[in-house]
Amino acid sequence: MDDPIRRLDDLTHQRVRLGIMVILDGAAAVEFTYLQRELGLTAGNLSRHLAALESAGLVQIEKGFAGRRPRTRARITPEGRSALAREIEALAELVDRVRSRAARGPWRPLPTSNG
Amino acid sequence: MSNLAPEAVLRELRRHARRARRRYRPGWVPLLAFGVLWLASLAFARAGRGGAPMAYWLAGSLLAYAITGWYLWRARRALGARVALLRFVVLGLATVLGIGLLDRLSAELGLLPIAGVALAYVALALVCWRSWPMAAVMTALLVVALLATVGPARAAAWPLTAAYGLALLGYGAVRWIRA
């Protein structure tokens, strides 16, 4: 049987990285400061996560200027969108599995033959 | 961090996705802003003045436009939302000028100010948002406003205004919740 835990990707299965990708998935090109504020991260921390996702080809970083001020934007790539969909699907399957087990009642050990 | 419960992770992801979508598709902002404007106009009817004056619609529309424009600008800057800001500003100015001109015309034509304001909203929906559902809502407003300006229905202008203000708020709230 296909175990959803095996389908979780170590690169994307991380709260902050998933958060970044979900936000990018819902918009066109997201400003660095917006991501920082929404996820409550320091600039350095966010940069490290974005760099990891960029090196895997899941996000694309655009550096430019808004007037004289430097501006960094990120957008999700088609590969990133697929990776996010796979991750969410695996997570949802895990949740379903845990719920269905909980509905069957608490776990009990099998009775032993000499007991 | 990878040992978080999947349910908690999914919940947090849904929250992030919803917040981003609400910011990225800000169609609910003008609905709420103009809904409040319409409902607030009822204060004039209750005060026995027979309806909000043109100055109210002029200043109120300007304020609602400014709030909406500020939100659209932020959405475009932060999330790259496709927003026709220039068209929005041009149409906003035209609306305000139009409402000002209607101040003179409405008395001669027997129109209530809300008819002119409603016409401006239809243009707003079609030109700025290119949204057919929103255009339908605004057209319904125009019909209501025109009906309220003629004959015996004129007495029902303010209940209709209230109903329409609530409809705008309701539609805005639905779009906000469903984002």
Image (tube, helix red, strand yellow):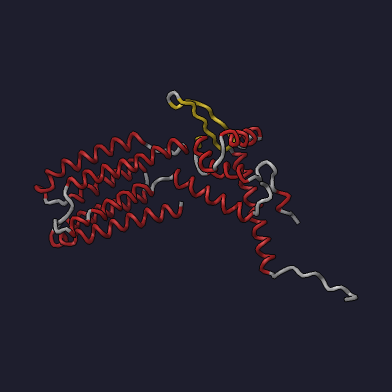
x, y percentage for residue B57? 21, 47
In this image, B84 relative to B62: left or right? right
- Residue A10: x %, y % from top left: 70, 43
Q: Residue shown at 57%/54% (left/top)?
A: B11
User: Which of the pair A100/B44 is nearer the observer?
Assistant: B44
**Residue A62: x and y, percent?**
54, 29
Determine the image quadrant of residue B40. bottom left
Compared to residue B109, the image places residue A49 above or below, namely above
**In this view, which residue lies farthest toward the left?**
B108
Q: Quadrant of residue B178?
A: bottom left
Q: Quick one: which residue is furthest to the right in this view?
A: A114
Q: Is residue A69 left or right of residue B39?
A: right
Residue at position x 60%, y 43% in the image: A16
Which residue occupies the extreme top position in the image? A68
Residue at position x 83%, y 73% from top?
Answer: A111
Residue at 28% x, 46% y is B121
Looking at the image, which is closer to me, B91 or B54? B54
Tally the numbered discs.
Answer: 0
Does residue A66 lie above or below A112 as drawn? above
Find residue B52 and report its horizontal and vertical position in percent. 18, 52
In the displayed orientation, state which residue is furthest to the bottom. Answer: A115
Left or right of residue B131: residue A30? right
